[in-house]
Image (cartoon, grey):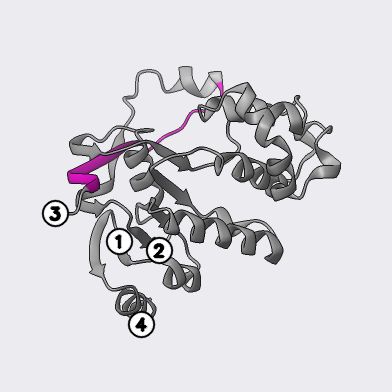
Amino acid sequence: MKTQTAIQLSNIIKEFIIPHERYDTLREHFTHILRPRTYEKFRALDGITLSIPCGQFLGVIGNNGSGKSTLLKVMAGIIQPNRGTIRTEGTISPFLELGIGFQPELTGKENVYLYGAILGLSSREVKKRYQEIVEFSELERFMDQKVKNYSSGMAVRLAFSVAIQADADIYLIDEVLAVGDLSFQNKCFGVFERFKNQGKTIVFVSHDLGVVLRFSDRVIILDKGQIIVDGDPREVVDRYVKES
């Protein structure tokens, strides 16, 4: 029986335009108005071809600037590639830049409902799960405070607690464990275990190689926008450590 594919990327190329000169003031702009600006193209993804079966936990590792976050954003449809094709099977919940939809002048409670709506949850669904969300975030004392008074870690914890309520087929997760104490990280690990047991497809970007080894069925290394290694988690991580 052929395994169904959750995500199929074929020859994905993503380039960004980087200006060589930046004019911060009106005076600088008019002073250089007759001088043509120069740009360079930065190829963040360079011919990525990748097939991810349904139910697989894929770990993505690589140095900063290797294209990991760009890869997830392309998978999520947040940014479009310059070339190549993307096919996905099922609904996607991206855990990227968590909390970016929060409104700082609203309270934590109000933002739970707002963020839930962004993720496709109805007001009734959020109300039903509200206490579970708050308990998971460990922010009971702060739900009536405005989010602008939250630390970045608190905002991400609250956003993660809402995001895991979205019942998706594919989860794209980018460094959510970079914030939070050990207790919160252990709860995140429990969520990963649950997703795996439910047969969800997970693409997980992290610099924490221990977590990558613990959960991944397969690991790829990105370097300069290309997949340079793809295979068994232990073998790939050992190679990454040796060559870093």
Q: Distance between the residues labelled 2 and 1?
A: 7 Å
Q: Is mark 1 on a helix, strand or loop?
A: strand
Assign the C terminus to one quadrant of the image.
bottom left
| Residue bearing mark 1 | 223
Task: Please give the residue where the numbered disc 4 appears in the rendered image.
Answer: 242
Q: Distance between the residues labelled 3 and 1?
A: 31 Å
Q: Do the residues labelled 2 and 1 touch (CB within 8 Å)?
A: yes
Q: State the mark number for residue 63.
A: 2
| Disc 3, SS | loop
Q: As shown in the figure, which amino acid type bears the numbered disc 4?
A: Lys
Q: Which residue is drawn at 44% across and 59% down?
A: 197
- Magenta stretch? 5-25
Residue at image point 49% right, 28% down: 23
User: Within 10 Å of the Cα at label 1, are there few (<14), some (14-19), or many (20+) other Cα atoms?
Assistant: many
Q: Position of residue 204 (x, y in %)?
A: 42, 56
Q: Earlier in the sequence, mark 4 or mark 3?
A: 3
Q: Earlier in the sequence, mark 3 or mark 1?
A: 3
Mark 4 and mark 3 residues within 8 Å of each other at the beta carbon: no
Residue density around tag 4, few if under 14, some if 14–19, many if 20 or more, within 10 Å: few
- Which of the two labelled residues, at mark 4 and mark 2, occupies the earlier sequence position? 2
Kind of residue indicated by mark 1: Asp
Measured Cα–Cα span from mark 4 to mark 2: 13 Å
In the picture provided, is 1 more to the left or to the right than 166? left
Query: Is the N terminus in the top left, top right, bottom left or bottom right quadrant?
Result: bottom left
Would residue 22 be counted in the magenta stretch? yes
- Residue 155, above or below 23: below
| Label 3 neighbour load within 10 Å: few <14, some 14-19, many 20+ | few
Q: Which residue is drawn at 55% across and 44% down?
A: 164
Which amino acid type is marked by label 2?
Asn
